[in-house]
Image (cartoon, rainbow, N blue to C red):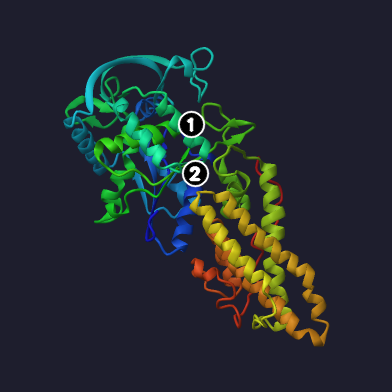
């Protein structure tokens, strides 16, 4: 990864239905990475957006009595709005209906065609429209059903343009072997490499039976396969969404996706880039499914979790924290109202929020609201903060959001233990314990400042409110601001309403 720039992407979301908590999860995780790298002082470009072509969109639009473009416009706006609600700090929102995206995709395909990587042929296979993908017999579920959605597939046969994916098998294997951490976590790397090693079939990259898509530049009666159109968004966005020299961000440092689109990103995508003679991404991070009742959430199964009631009742930072803490990044995890409430009350409200309130109130009561000077009597907490900061950076370097949050929470609990061990309320009654009281109040304030800066990527709004309460600049959230003790002594604290107030009832 580069030391001065950081380019991160989410997959672009398919606009066949309203966004749900699975989409929120990916966007939040990407935002946490982006914010952390901004803390490092890097120039970050964070890309998300919507995928708007293909048969599924055309059919959904027809069923709703809309044109495909009108349908895409309405749903794309909802995904853009979701990003705002999630407080995602993305730098650009791409749409595959953007004219500049379409032009660049056509240019790239024309280059690949001229080089002989694309040829005309016939193909027949079992096709899942919701997936926009073909499946071989052995991959299908009972009764010829899609292995992802469980819905019936249909036999599709037509004359199309094909990409010579099979010709890139050896180059792909060589890349995987030379970069063993290219896909994380490890089981996904092994799965993707096995797909390649088992053999690759050439890829049909056009469709003749639909018209809603990017026309093939040399054969406008056909449209480019929606996945090829979509994958190139990561490249095209830099040409018009990142400023006049946007391509300086290439290649992406980290690309996030769910495991159901592993093959498209870890097999097809790098082969397309090789054919276009474009450098490959530095790393792909694959997360699991957000489950409800043990099943992947989807419109097809009808088991969606709407994130908006949770945000309305608990606040956006609570959702961001819950998803990063409860669902281990890279693995499947279950979303439940009970689990959400337990994390909110037990950790956010009782451990972090209460710690801030107690600290600010004690400084107000015992030191007239001014954080006392460091008496130099504590070494354990400063050392712990330095150690955990390094561990958090290491966790982000390995694309492990959950471990980073868990590590920060070790500090929250260490500071809570300090309160109980030192009992400032007892020290305040002893005239001879002035230095000891000063020290514990300083350590609590300085430790809290470090903790909330480290947690800022996860709970940005709450972290900024906490910094203000501690008399700190809420915009001072770089990793250097997390160094223990910087700018704390002499600051005036301000009592605020609870960061995480009690919530009566809960959404289902």
Q: In the rendered image of this protein, does residue 185 appear above or below residue 123?
A: below
The image quarter containing residue 223 is top left
In percent of width and height, residue 74 lies at 39, 39
Quarter of the image with the C terminus in it: top right
Label 1 and label 2: CA atoms lie apart by 21 Å
Q: Marks 1 and 2: CB-CB under 8 Å? A: no
**Would you place residue 411 above or below residue 255 in this image?**
below
Residue on which disc 1 sits: 191
Residue identified by numbered label 2: 26
In this picture, residue 488 sits left or right of residue 167: right
Q: Does residue 487 appear left or right of residue 256 in this picture?
A: right
Q: Is residue 109 visible?
A: yes
Residue 477 appearing in the image = no
Q: Quadrant of residue 430?
A: bottom right
Q: Tell me which residue sits at (71%, 76%) in the image.
A: 440
The one nearer the camera, 11 or 86, is 11
Choose the circle earlier in sequence order: 1 or 2: 2
Local secondary structure at mark 1: helix
Q: Report x, y in % for residue 181.
A: 46, 43
Above or below, 151 against 390 in this view is above
Q: Which mark is residue 434?
A: none
Task: Report crowding for label 2: few under 14, some 14 to 19, many 20 or more residues within 10 A (C-alpha).
Answer: many
Residue 22, image x, y percentages: 53, 39
């Amino acid at each position: 990864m580069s030391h001065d720039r950081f380019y991160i992407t989410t997959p672009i979301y398919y606009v066949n239905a309203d966004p749900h908590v699975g989409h929120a999860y990916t966007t939040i995780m990407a935002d946490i990475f982006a914010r952390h790298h901004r803390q490092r002082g890097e120039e970050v470009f964070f890309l998300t957006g919507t995928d708007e072509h293909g048969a599924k969109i055309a059919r959904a639009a027809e069923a709703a009595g809309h044109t495909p473009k009108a349908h895409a416009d309405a749903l794309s706006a909802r995904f853009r709005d979701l990003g705002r609600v999630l407080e995602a700090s993305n730098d650009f929102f791409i749409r595959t209906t953007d004219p500049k995206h379409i032009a660049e995709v056509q240019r790239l395909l024309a280059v690949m065609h001229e080089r002989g990587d694309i040829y005309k042929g016939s193909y027949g296979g079992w096709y899942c429209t919701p997936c926009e993908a073909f499946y071989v017999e052995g991959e299908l579920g009972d009764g010829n059903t899609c292995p992802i959605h469980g819905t019936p597939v249909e036999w599709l046969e037509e004359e199309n343009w094909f990409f010579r994916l099979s010709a890139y098998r050896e180059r792909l294997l060589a890349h995987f072997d030379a970069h063993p951490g290219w896909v994380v976590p490890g089981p996904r790397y092994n799965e993707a490499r096995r797909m390649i090693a088992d053999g690759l079939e050439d890829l049909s990259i056009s469709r003749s039976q639909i018209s809603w898509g990017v026309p093939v530049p040399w054969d406008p009666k056909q449209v480019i396969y929606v996945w090829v159109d979509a994958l190139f968004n990561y490249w095209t966005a830099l040409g018009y969404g990142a400023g006049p020299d946007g391509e300086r961000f290439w290649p992406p440092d980290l690309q996030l996706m769910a495991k159901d689109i592993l093959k498209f990103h870890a097999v097809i995508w790098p082969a397309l880039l090789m054919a276009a003679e474009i450098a490959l991404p530095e790393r792909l991070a694959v997360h699991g499914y957000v489950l409800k009742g043990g099943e992947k959430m989807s419109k097809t199964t009808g088991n969606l979790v709407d994130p908006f009631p949770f945000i309305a009742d608990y606040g956006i930072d609570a959702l961001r924290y819950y998803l990063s803490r409860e669902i281990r990044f890279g693995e499947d995890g279950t979303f439940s109202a009970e689990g959400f409430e337990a994390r909110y009350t037990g950790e956010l409200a009782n451990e972090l929020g209460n710690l801030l309130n107690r600290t600010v109130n004690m400084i107000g009561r015992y030191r007239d609201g001014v954080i006392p000077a460091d008496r130099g009597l504590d070494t354990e907490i400063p050392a712990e903060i330095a150690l955990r900061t390094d561990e958090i950076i290491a966790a982000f370097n390995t694309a492990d959001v959950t471990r980073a949050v868990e590590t920060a929470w070790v500090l929250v609990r260490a500071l809570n233990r300090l309160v109980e061990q030192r009992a400032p309320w007892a020290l305040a009654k002893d005239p001879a314990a002035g230095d000891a009281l000063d020290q514990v109040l300083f350590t609590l304030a300085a430790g809290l400042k470090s903790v909330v800066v480290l947690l800022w990527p996860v709970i940005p709004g709450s972290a900024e409110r906490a910094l203000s309460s501690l008399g700190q600049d809420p915009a001072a959230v770089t990793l250097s601001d997390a160094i223990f003790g910087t700018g704390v002594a002499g600051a005036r604290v301000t009592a605020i309403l609870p960061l995480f107030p009690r919530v009566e009832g809960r959404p289902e």
